[in-house]
Image (cartoon, rainbow, N blue to C red):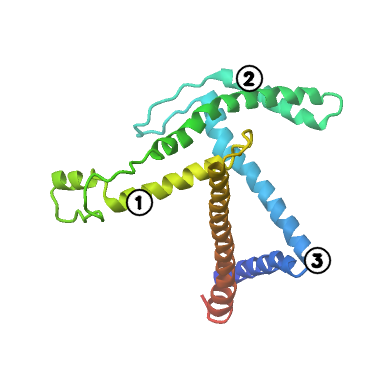
């Protein structure tokens, strides 16, 4: 088959899939259902292949049989550890969840995974939020009378380091706004303490307003991401397929 014709057929299928999936914006229809099931089937097949190529092969199979480098390669030879075979029956136990009689076996790998995951999350939590807590400690008193931080272009490394070590008035104002935002947002979540003090009540109200601003920004970025995907698909249909592919030639 002509490669150019084959490319146009592939692009045409991609256009049908795009239009079919977006047709749900009008209403639920069979055309959308067809492409939805097609997408789910392809995704399931891809997930099975990815499970082997990206996870099981390197993290399980290679560790069992070892890795012998090709001729001329300087990579070290990795010996095989057959003890990893014991992970296979543990993993198979998870599929007993579909058995009414022996579904209790599926709880064994689930318990193992949850135990390992729970232990790892302590370190994961600290690695993620520990630096954030350290960075929340900011100076609020300026160490110089200069308002703005000067540019360091053309300075020597010693002078640039000295200039960056100073807390300027603009930095102090920014840090004060940051700390007010942080403390007010945290105070909003003190549900176990009754807020009788007027100052604390105002802090929680301010925290709620600032949280709404943050959530609004997150929602806005999510909407813009959806529009980015839409624009990309429309570019594919009208420019790559119709203009350049179908009528313009590729």
Which residue is located at x 58 percent, y 76 percent?
Answer: 238
Quadrant assignment, res 150: bottom left
- Mark 1 residue crowding within 10 angstroms, few (<14) / some (14–19) / many (20+): some
Lateral position of residue 23 relative to residue 146, left or right: right
Where does the N terminus fall, quadrant-wise? bottom right
Instruction: Name the residue tied to disc 2.
Output: 86
Which of the two residues, 12 or 34, is positioned nearer the viewer here? Answer: 34
> Sequence order check: which comes first, mark 2 or mark 1?
2
> Sequence order check: which comes first, mark 2 or mark 3?
3
Q: Is residue 150 above or below residue 29?
A: above
How far is the residue under mark 3 from the one under mark 1? Answer: 56 Å
SS at mark 2 in the image: helix
Q: Position of residue 204 (x, y in %)?
A: 57, 45
The answer to whether the residues at label 2 and label 3 have Cβ atoms under 8 Å apart is: no
Which of the two residues, 171 or 33, is positioned nearer the viewer here? Answer: 171
Instruction: Name the residue tied to disc 1.
Output: 173
- Mark 2 residue crowding within 10 angstroms, few (<14) / some (14–19) / many (20+): few
Mark nearest the camera among 3 and 1 is 1
Instruction: Name the residue tied to disc 3.
Output: 29
Q: Position of residue 239 (x, y in %)?
A: 54, 76
- Mark 3 residue crowding within 10 angstroms, few (<14) / some (14–19) / many (20+): few
Residue closest to the far right:
101
């Amino acid at each position: 088959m002509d490669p150019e014709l084959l490319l146009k057929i592939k692009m045409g299928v991609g256009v049908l899939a795009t239009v079919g999936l977006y047709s749900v914006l009008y209403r639920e229809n069979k055309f959308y259902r067809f492409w939805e099931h097609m997408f789910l089937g392809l995704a399931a097949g891809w997930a099975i292949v990815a499970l082997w190529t990206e996870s099981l092969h390197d993290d399980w199979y290679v560790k069992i049989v070892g890795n012998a480098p090709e001729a001329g390669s300087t990579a070290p030879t990795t010996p095989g550890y057959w003890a990893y075979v014991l992970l296979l029956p543990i993993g198979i136990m998870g599929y007993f969840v579909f058995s009414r009689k022996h579904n209790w076996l599926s709880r064994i790998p689930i318990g193992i995974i949850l135990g390992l995951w729970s232990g790892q999350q302590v370190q994961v939590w600290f690695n993620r939020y520990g630096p954030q807590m350290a960075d929340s400690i900011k100076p609020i008193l300026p160490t110089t009378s200069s308002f703005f931080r000067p540019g360091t272009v053309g300075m020597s490394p010693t002078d640039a380091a000295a200039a960056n070590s100073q807390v300027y008035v603009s930095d102090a104002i920014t840090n004060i706004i940051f700390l007010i935002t942080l403390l007010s947002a945290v105070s909003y979540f003190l549900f176990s303490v009754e807020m009788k003090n007027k100052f604390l009540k105002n802090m929680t109200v301010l925290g709620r307003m600032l949280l709404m601003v943050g959530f609004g920004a997150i929602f806005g970025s999510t909407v813009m991401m959806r529009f980015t995907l839409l624009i990309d698909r429309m570019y594919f249909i009208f420019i790559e397929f119709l203009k350049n592919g179908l009528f313009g030639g590729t």
